[in-house]
Image (cartoon, helix red, strand yellow):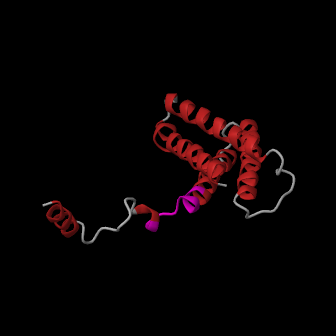
């Protein structure tokens, strides 16, 4: 009787993979974390460049742009696209600080009254924090 149910379940799962997690073969979390964190920081960096070109709050945009360039250099060093020995000792603490800043930005963008902050930059900041967290835990 027990073999009958096993055979019946095998027929239902004929096209499924043997493993319980079928996304392991399709989606590699390391690649998503690498490029997702780079894309999230690049989007925020491009928004600061757009603010500078439109003359919106130039001083804070320059300050934010330099901070985001630093964040991008740290992430590029972590994913081994750049080889900088400056960040090696403090890499994990810098990445934790980046996660903190992105989570803080997420909440700040959520309470903003500008719709683009609520619907675009808040998710980008949250995903950036998530991708950097995954990057911190995987390497």
Q: Is residue 115 magenta?
A: no
Above or below for 125 versus 36: above
Residue nearest the viewer, comparing 102 with 44: 102
- Find residue 102 and report its horizontal and vertical position in percent: 62, 39
Rendered residue at 72%/36% (across/down): 60
Q: Give, as a single range, the part of the protein colored magenta.
A: 25-33
For residue 78, what is the image quadrant?
bottom right
Rendered residue at 75%/51% (across/down): 74
Specify the farthest residue to the bottom.
Answer: 15
Position of residue 109 in the picture relative to residue 17 (left or right): right
Of the 4 image quadrants, the one containing the C terminus is: bottom right
Residue nearest the viewer, comparing 117 with 139: 139
Total numbered labels placed on residues in the image? 0
Specify the farthest residue to the front.
Answer: 1
Residue nearest the viewer, comparing 1 with 86: 1
Magenta segment, principal secondary structure?
Answer: helix
- Find residue 117 and report its horizontal and vertical position in percent: 52, 38
Position of residue 47 in the picture relative to residue 2 (left or right): right
- Find residue 132 and report its horizontal and vertical position in percent: 62, 48
For residue 98, what is the image quadrant?
top right
Q: Is residue 28 magenta?
A: yes
Position of residue 8 in the picture relative to residue 112 (left or right): left
């Amino acid at each position: 009787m027990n073999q009958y149910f096993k055979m019946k379940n095998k027929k239902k799962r004929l096209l499924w993979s043997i493993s319980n997690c079928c996304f392991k073969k399709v989606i590699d979390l390391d690649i998503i974390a690498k490029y997702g964190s780079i894309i999230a920081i690049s989007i925020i960096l491009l928004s600061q460049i757009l603010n500078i070109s439109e003359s919106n709050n130039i001083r804070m945009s320059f300050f934010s742009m330099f901070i985001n360039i630093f964040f991008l250099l740290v992430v590029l060093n972590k994913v081994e696209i750049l080889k900088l020995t400056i960040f090696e000792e403090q890499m994990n603490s810098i990445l934790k600080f980046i996660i903190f800043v992105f989570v803080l930005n997420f909440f700040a963008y959520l309470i903003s009254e500008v719709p683009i902050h609520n619907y675009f930059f808040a998710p980008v900041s949250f995903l950036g924090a998530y991708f950097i967290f995954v990057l911190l835990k995987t390497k």
